[in-house]
Amino acid sequence: MAKKKDVHQECKRIGDRFVRWTIPRKNILDLLIRTQQHLTAKEIYAALLPLNPSMELTTIYRTLELLDKSGLIRKIYAGDGQARFEYKRADHAHHHLICTACGKILNYRDFEEEGMALVRKTEEILIRKHGFLIKDHDIEFLGLCENCRPGGIRPAIPGRLRRPLVIKERP
């Protein structure tokens, strides 16, 4: 869990990106820093309403859009049709497993070194091939969680249904 000083450090780091660094903006960022959950705008509103009873849901939506555009938070589209938000930790790269039935989101960090090596190689190929300046990436695996899967049980590791992805450099 993040400490209170983390919010203040973020405020200083990005202070010049906003006209005003308001209390609702600080509260929203603080909540996202402190939680490990992926929260909807309505969940954020419900959590912060006791701190600021005059705050409106539209303030939450506008602030989330602003924080997302500034690169401080990440918007994740879950299978339940609701956008969810998480604090974008620079030292905490991970990907997501998203259940398309219930919207559950799991952070995925297994095979981090191998996965990041593949991502870096892919980025290098895309830069060379398309001249595209890559600033960030999101990797999301969509499927059914253990609870939503038919039978609700974890299956044995299935055989490959598709050919594995092979990235080749062009000569």
Image (spheres, grey):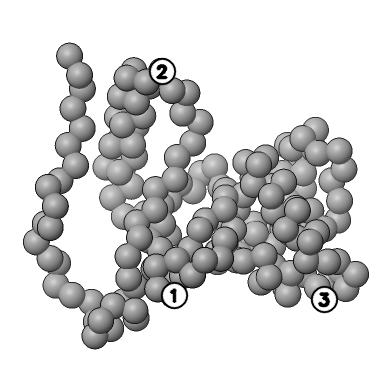
Q: Which residue is mark 3?
A: 50
Residue drawn at x 34%, y 81% is 147
Q: Amino acid at mark 1?
A: Cys
Neighbour tally class for label 1: few under 14, some 14-19, many 20 plus, Cα within 10 Å: some
Q: Earlier in the sequence, mark 2 or mark 3?
A: 3
**Is residue 141 rendered to the left or right of residue 132?**
left
- Secondary structure under tag 2 reads loop
Q: Quadrant of the N terminus?
A: bottom right
Neighbour tally class for label 3: few under 14, some 14-19, many 20 plus, Cα within 10 Å: few
**Is residue 78 rendered to the left or right of residue 46?**
left
- Measure the C-alpha gap from mark 2 to mark 3: 49 Å
Label disc, if present, on residue 165 of the rendered structure: none
Neighbour tally class for label 2: few under 14, some 14-19, many 20 plus, Cα within 10 Å: few
Q: Amino acid at mark 2?
A: Gly
- Measure the C-alpha gap from mark 3 to mark 1: 28 Å
Residue 116 against residue 48 in the figure, above or below: above
Image coords of residue 142 (percent x, y): 35, 60
Nearest to the observer: residue 138 or residue 77: 77
The reply to whether the C-beta atoms of the residues labelled 2 and 3 are less than 8 Å apart is no
Residue drawn at x 88%, y 73% is 53
Residue 104 against residue 122 in the figure, above or below: below
Q: Quadrant of residue 43?
A: bottom right
Q: Amino acid at mark 3?
A: Pro
Q: Quadrant of residue 117?
A: top left
Label disc, if present, on residue 131 of the rendered structure: 2
Whether residue 5 is visible here, answered yes or no, is no
Q: Earlier in the sequence, mark 3 or mark 1?
A: 3
Q: Which residue is mark 1?
A: 102
